[in-house]
Image: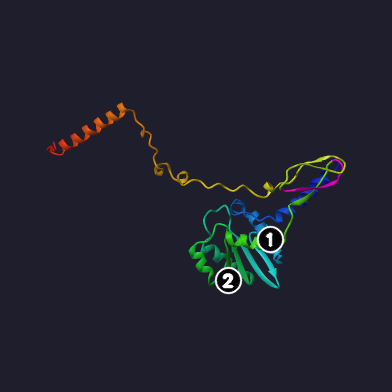
Amino acid sequence: MKFAEAADELQRREYARLKAATIPRPEQLRSMTAAQLRTEVAALWEALGHDIKTMPDADELVHVLGGRKYITICGNPVDRQPATAAALRRLRDRVVAGGADRGFYISVRGFTAEARHFAETAPVRLLDCERFLQAVGRVRNAVKISPVYQAMCRHCGDIVRHSLDDSAPKHCANGHTVPQPIARADFEKPRTPAQPVTAMLPGAFRPAIGKHLVMSPKAARRRAIKTHNYRRWRAQASHLPYSSE
């Protein structure tokens, strides 16, 4: 197919355009690598008019807006612990050393109480998962992007229009079939179903399931006899003298 290379390039451009307009969910952010999260953060700052001075995959993002310099550090989403005050002190030191106006620390795992207390009087601002998604939502919702995108026929190079929500193949002007190359599932992961409480408890704490609720008359009579004999033995044993020999 002589148009395969051009079709791949168009697909990459459309994928990047649609991905930039998709708002991730919290579980998606928490499953990202540190580099992927920094890329999302850099895209947010650029959408807000900031000029990124460092590479998006740098350990810290230096960005400028209106002549003011800012430094952003992202916590690693793989680390399930909330960001601590020690991490904010390192950011504060970088702000001071770099002569920046303010620092931003983004943690999709949240912050400890000590970290939030530290930020109240330090030149740093905190964005947890919820606040970060709110900022992303305000930027990306401001520009409504249709789920319709372009795809190229690999046989003749004709352009057809596909939709993220419609998996039906399209046909170009020359009658060639053009399958859907990009779907909504490419951007959105399925929501993790909530587990029942008992599924999250260790086996020792799960409520026991009665296996003998329904008993045969013979088994019930045997259990009653054993219970009676045991109680009788305890009553008699309580009056026996104790021998230390």
Q: Earlier in the sequence, mark 2 or mark 1?
A: 2
Residue type, numbered disc 2: Pro
Q: Can you see residue 70?
A: yes
What residue does disc 2 label? 123
User: Which mark's residue is nearer the viewer, 2 or 1?
Assistant: 1
Q: Which residues are magenta?
A: 155-164
Q: Residue at x 62, y 59 (%)?
A: 133
Q: Magenta stretch containing residue 161, yes or no?
A: yes
Q: Is residue 9 above or below residue 136?
A: above
What residue does disc 1 label? 141
Instruction: List x then y, in percent, for residue 177.
Output: 81, 39
Instruction: List x then y, in percent, for residue 61.
Output: 66, 63
Q: Residue at x 62, y 62 (%)?
A: 134
Count residues near mark 1 (Cα–Cα under 10 Å), then give few for <14, some for 14-19, many for 20+: few
Residue type, numbered disc 1: Asn
Element carrying mark 2: loop
